[in-house]
Amino acid sequence: MNKLYKGIVVVLVSLMLVACGGTGSTETAQGITDTEVLIGNCAATSGAYAPVGVPFNAGIEAYIAYVNENGGVNGRTLKWTHTDDEFDPVKGKACLQNLVETEEVFAVVGHFGTPVVAATIEDLKEYGIPAVYFATGIGQLYFDEAKDGERAIFPVQPIYKTEGQIMVARAVGDFGATKIGIIYTNDDAGKDMLEGARVKSQELGIELVEAQVAAGATDVSSAVATIKEAGVDFVIGAAIQGTIPTIIKALAEQNVNQDVITTYVNVAPAISEQVFDEINGKFDVYGNGWVSFDAEQAEALALYQANIDEEYAWNAYAITGWIAGHFFVQGLEEMGDATPTWDAYIDALEKAPIQNPFGGMIDFTNGQRKGTTVMNLSRIASKEGWEATKPLQSIDEILGN
């Protein structure tokens, strides 16, 4: 009886792997037919993060439309589905389950937001479904050598741990800082940036003064006072959109008139319009970036702008959505005529480094999952936006090594 039971279990597991396109499957994966590829995401398109989620999805949808108008990929058109999770991790988990188990998408493209990704990363690995591009940089996405379900994870944006190191490198290499203050949120994003900043500060022999605030806090005066009393000569704002304006305004209010650097996710008009009046004439706010609009990217920019609504022509979030679509399609193209399984798609993305049309190469070979490691720098120039001040550079280039 036990042998019969075990035999039934083995058969059921095998059938599940075939149905889902899991490890070892040679059958066409879910979400793919002879004529169509179904993909989707969960992203905040209402609420406080809608100014990010709406243009981000618009960029993905524009890339899908562009591909379909030009014949699709390997004879298949792309079909898109989306659910608004409102930046809520509970809703995000339910959304992901629905995408994979009910709608049966082939891949998740542009999984969105730090709290949702943190709540669902283990689910993604367990499913083994390809997840291409994450609109966050949390440390759980980083792998030196991904294995098993980790191989299905394909981060493109910078990982916050790496960005924390880059922030310290910028403070030292570009601004001559010797004592850096860091105000960080008590969430995954803030703690990961702090971890990276600690690593690089210790490596360079730089003092790092730390102050923690709650994510979404409306009063950060105590943390700012700590930074002020320490007499730092540069400040890192290790917080994402919901908290960084509060931090910057508090620094200005307490006359901590030292330049500030923050994460790439904050480099958008939605931030500059909130803080410019408070910082103008006191100090500058800088932000990392990982996309470029230099001469090398002129052709890519023209293509993007020809296929996006005019209101998003220069929207950073819409551009990153376009990049997300680009990376997903690169995997399909590299897969070619192979039976479209999850394994075949994952192998295709791991074959060789992939060029970001607006930046550097992203290397998924040998199980690497590090996102981009080359960043540029921008400064808040007006309420309307940011201006570029430094080109794409690695940490060694920033430090002059």
Image (cartoon, rainbow, N blue to C red):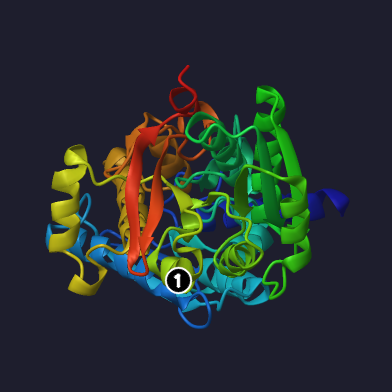
**Amino acid on which the number 1 mark rests in the picture:** Asp
Residue 93: x %, y % from top left: 64, 70
Most distant residue in the bottom direction = 47
**Label 1 element class:** helix
Residue 225: quadrant of the picture? bottom right
In-image side of 351 versus 129 (left or right): left
Q: How many marks?
A: 1
Q: Is residue 32 visible?
A: no
Read off the residue under disc 1.
277
Residue 364: x %, y % from top left: 46, 34
Q: For this rendering, which residue is in front, 327 or 331?
A: 327
Residue 73: x %, y % from top left: 22, 52
For image coordinates 43% across by 48% down, the residue present is: 341
Residue 193: x %, y % from top left: 64, 46
Residue 11 against residue 197 in the figure, above or below: below
Q: For this rendering, which residue is in front, 175 or 272?
A: 175
In-image side of 14 versus 306 (left or right): right
In-image side of 236 versus 225 (left or right): left
Q: Is residue 40 visible?
A: yes
Question: Which corner quadrant holds the N terminus?
Answer: bottom right
